[in-house]
Image (cartoon, rainbow, N blue to C red):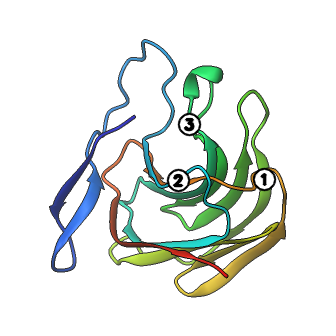
Amino acid sequence: DGAYEVHPCSGRTGRCLEQVITQKPIPWGPLPDPWTLAGDIHWNDYRERTDFRVPADGIATLIGRIDSADVFQDQKARYPSGYVLRIEADGHWTLLSTVYKKADKELAAGQIALDTSRWHSMELNFQDSTIQATVDGKSVAQVEDQTHTHGMIGLGSGWNRTSFDNFVVEAVR
């Protein structure tokens, strides 16, 4: 859901992917937070990284090992089934494992300094059952979990104008 469009970047040169719907619509069915996905369901060990800029009321998410994106399986799902690194504008971050029809499982959480007037980076690394989350080049979590062993990649936000740039996915050997 939501709508991602390419616009001139704010605070840097070039063009960025931006979520542009800022008012949550009235749902006719499931209405998760805005996210978009790409990749291959068979990907397993990889690193995904993106720069992001979140507004003062915003949220940015990086999603990996998405093994199902069928939100109609669960009317209350906010995210696809996979691992979600969620960063709020106040600097609170959470690493979640999400599975349809089950409560989100918090794998790690914390607080970082986050200046919403600047661009930041976030990264997820998947190698076997090890998941590492990095923000602005600093590891914030490394956990072991085998809930999702393969899947696609995704970016997400709240109902705000979060921007993304320099998105990279690389195989990990």
Tell me the residue that label 2 is attached to: 40
Few, some or many C-alpha atoms within 10 Å of disc 2 (few <14, some 14-19, many ≥20)?
A: some
- The disc placed on residue 106 is 1
- N-terminal of the pair, mark 1 or mark 3, is 3
Provide the secondary structure element on which disc 3 rests: loop
| Percent coordinates x, y for residue 161 in the rendering | 30, 52
Relative depth, front residue between 165 and 57: 165
The reply to whether discs 1 and 3 touch (Cβ–Cβ < 8 Å) is no
Q: Residue at x 58, y 49 (%)?
A: 41
Left or right of 52? Residue 105 is right
Left or right of 40? Residue 27 is left
Amino acid carrying mark 3 in the image? Ala
Q: Residue at x 75, y 52 (%)?
A: 148
Q: Nearer the viewer, mark 1 or mark 3?
A: 3
| Percent coordinates x, y for residue 170 in the rendering | 52, 76
Q: Looking at the picture, does residue 147 appear above or below residue 139?
A: above
The quadrant of the rendering that contains the C terminus is: bottom right
- 3D distance between C-alphas at marks 2 and 3: 12 Å
| Percent coordinates x, y for residue 160 in the rendering | 35, 47
- N-terminal of the pair, mark 1 or mark 2, is 2
Q: Residue at x 67, y 62 (%)?
A: 44
- The image quadrant of residue 155 is bottom left
